[in-house]
Image (cartoon, rainbow, N blue to C red):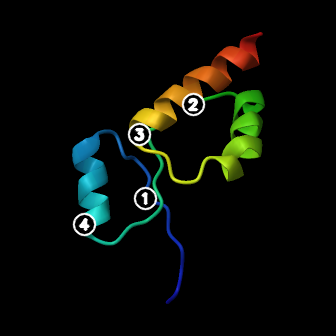
Amino acid sequence: FGMRLICEGVEDEGDLNWARSIGCRYFQGWYFSKAVDSTLAQRMLAAQPALGTPTPGELAHWLARISAGARA
């Protein structure tokens, strides 16, 4: 149908690999980030265009930097 779907509930690399194997391109879940408050979510969304497509490790590092800034 030409729809863009987000695979939710990706908790580990196995979940991510399975979702990719069935053609998913967009993901959400604890594997990428714990739940965040609205202030941090706004910062994440504002910074997203500069991210490109990070690896999970790069994303974790980026989230840690953004989280530290949100508390400062």
Q: Residue 36 falls in which quadrant of the image?
A: top right
Label located before the other in sequence (4 or 3): 4
**Is disc 1 in contact with disc 2, using a CB cutoff of under 8 Å?**
no
**Marks 1, 2: nearer the viewer:** 2
Q: Amino acid at mark 4?
A: Ser
Residue designated by label 2: 62
Q: Which mark is residue 21?
A: 4
Label located before the other in sequence (4 or 2): 4
**SS label for mark 2:** helix
**Is disc 1 in contact with disc 4, using a CB cutoff of under 8 Å?**
no
Count the marks: how many? 4
Q: Separation of disc 1 and disc 3 at Cα?
A: 15 Å
Q: Residue 34 appears at what percent x and percent y?
A: 50, 29
In the displayed structure, would residue 28 be above or below residue 36? below
Q: Which mark is residue 56?
A: 3
**Marks 4, 3: nearer the viewer:** 3
